[in-house]
Amino acid sequence: MAKTSAIEKNKRRRKTVADHAAKRAALKAIIMNQDLPIEDRFKATLKLASLPRNGSKTRIRNRCEVTGRPRAFYRKLKMSRIALRELGNLGKVPGIVKSSW
């Protein structure tokens, strides 16, 4: 089980990203628009830099929904390999059967 503080920090980051997503997208559109004057684009760059760092989508860490483990994460199932194996052995994940021969 992961530290509760790490899990909560990631939840706060997800909330911050959701709050600032529209503003970041608008500023990035201004920055990438080559038709606008360079001064306006530079001002937009400064505004983007003044936003919180945790508002960026790349700061989010994929974590297991069951244990909070940050590594060996399966995106489709939203869980780690260890949790997948345990729940698969118990028959709680549809379509997963532990093979034996």
Image (tube, rainbow, N blue to C red):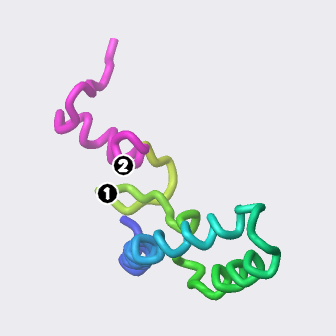
Q: How many marks?
A: 2
Question: Which range of residues does the magenta coloring cover?
Answer: 75-101
Using the image, tell me which numbered label, if any, was put on residue 65. 1
Residue 15 in percent (x, y) is at 38, 75
Relative horizontal placement of residue 84, taking residue 23 as reference (left or right): left
Q: How far is disc 2 from disc 1 in space, using C-alphas?
A: 6 Å
The vertical placement of 47 against 3, above or below, is below
Asked where in the image residue 69 lies, by quadrant, the reply is bottom left
Amino acid type shown at disc 1: Glu
Answer above or below: position of 35 versus 101. Answer: below
Residue 89 lies, in percent from the top left, at 24, 34
* Residue 26 image-quadrant placement: bottom right
Q: Is mark 2 on a helix, strand or loop?
A: strand
Residue 78: give x, y in percent of width and height. Answer: 36, 48
- Asked if residue 96 lies in the magenta stretch, the reply is yes
Taking 48 as reference, is 85 left or right?
Answer: left
- Foreground residue, 8 or 25? 25
Which residue is painted at 38% across and 40% down in the image? 76
Q: Which amino acid does label 2 sit on?
A: Met
Q: In this rendering, is residue 32 above or below 23?
A: above
Please name the residue that numbered disc 2 is placed on.
Answer: 79
The x, y position of residue 92, in whole percent, is 17, 38
Magenta span includes 56: no
- Residue count near mark 1 (Cα–Cα under 10 Å), binned few <14, some 14–19, many ≥20: some
Q: What element carries label 1?
A: loop
Contact between marks 2 and 1 (CB within 8 A): the answer is yes
- Mark 1 or mark 2, which is nearer the start of the sequence? 1
Identify the image quadrant of the N terminus: bottom left
Which residue corresponds to the image point at 50% horizontal and 47% vertical from the top-left? Answer: 72
